[in-house]
Image (cartoon, grey):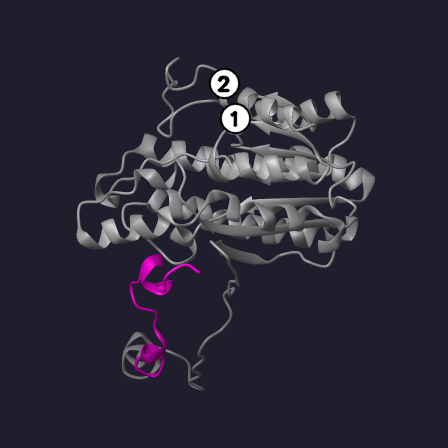
Amino acid sequence: MERMMEGKVVVVTGAGGGIGRETALQLAAEGAKVVVNDIGVALNGDNLSASEAPVPPAEAVVAEIRAAGGEAVASMDSVAGRASAEAIIQCAIDTFGRIDGVVNNAGNLRDRSFHKMSEDEWRSVIAVHLDGTFFVSRAAATYFRNQESGAMVHMTSTSGLIGNYGQANYGAAKLGIVALSKMIALDMGRYNVRSNCIAPSAWSRMTSSIPTDTPQQRDRVEKLKKMEAGKIAPMAVYLLTDEAREVTGQIFAVRANEIMLMSQPRPLRSVHFSEGWTPRRIAEVAIPAMQKHFYPLERSPDVMSWDPI
């Protein structure tokens, strides 16, 4: 059977471990030439010790791909700056002569209750997730436009789509990525460029930092441990293939063996007052009419509360 990514070149950011690593490995198995990008630091940005990473994570994944007969190159540039993000895409051009797909997976965490969150905790997460997704996608966009083809997959999160405690920075970045993806799909559709989001649920280095102070938190972590990072990769790979040529501007959630198409904001309830609204009329008429449709303050585990399949 012909491999679905034969001859294509794909950049995967944050590919030194977890979902990114599994995506890079599965892309290579499907015939893609892969730029494995990872700066090789801890989740908080600290450098990894020699005992933690005797070989840079990106190079370790490249070695795995080559050992299996695939083609790959390591990139250790940061996604968080425009010049370094451009260098990631340039690595694909210099090594393999083209670029066909991007998986924006690089991430970090600085969890903190909103009223305690520092400016650095805010900016560092926005820089990697939202700015990084823009910079890498923008660097690839010029090539995609010129060749009139290309696909982007961006990792979002139910923390942004639904909500979670202590993740104002992460949730804001991840929901911003959804809007960015939709705008890319709209602006670049005329050039046959596609852009989609995946909200993954899997046990990885990112989720291993979830606190386990309460029975509910411990139960959530035990559920997450059952969800393998390798289960996310097939959807990311599919969205980069020619088979997905009609799929763009969508948000998918993937956990274990489930694939969910997520809703996007649309008007839910409308009220009209012919004489115009005043604050008093809003209080007496508009809000009571809409209130039963309000969304509760739920977190992602409250909404997706069933056990993974």
Read off the magenta span.
288-309
Q: Nearer the viewer, mark 1 or mark 2?
A: 2
Spot occupied by residue 271 in the image (x, y as percentages of width and height): 43, 82
Spot occupied by residue 217 in the image (x, y as percentages of width and height): 24, 50
How many neighbours does mark 2 have within 10 angstroms: few (below 14), some (14-19), or many (20 or more)? some
Spot occupied by residue 260 in the image (x, y as percentages of width and height): 52, 62
Amino acid type, label 2: Pro
Q: Is residue 304 above or below residue 123?
A: below
Q: Left or right: where does residue 210 sit relative to residue 28?
A: left
Q: Left or right: where does residue 238 sit relative to residue 227?
A: right
Where residue 216 sits, quadrant-wise, is bottom left
Residue 288 can be seen, yes or no: yes
How many neighbours does mark 1 have within 10 angstroms: few (below 14), some (14-19), or many (20 or more)? many
Tell me if residue 210 is in the magenta stretch: no
Residue at the spot of label 1: 38
Q: Left or right: where does residue 122 sit relative to residue 81?
A: left
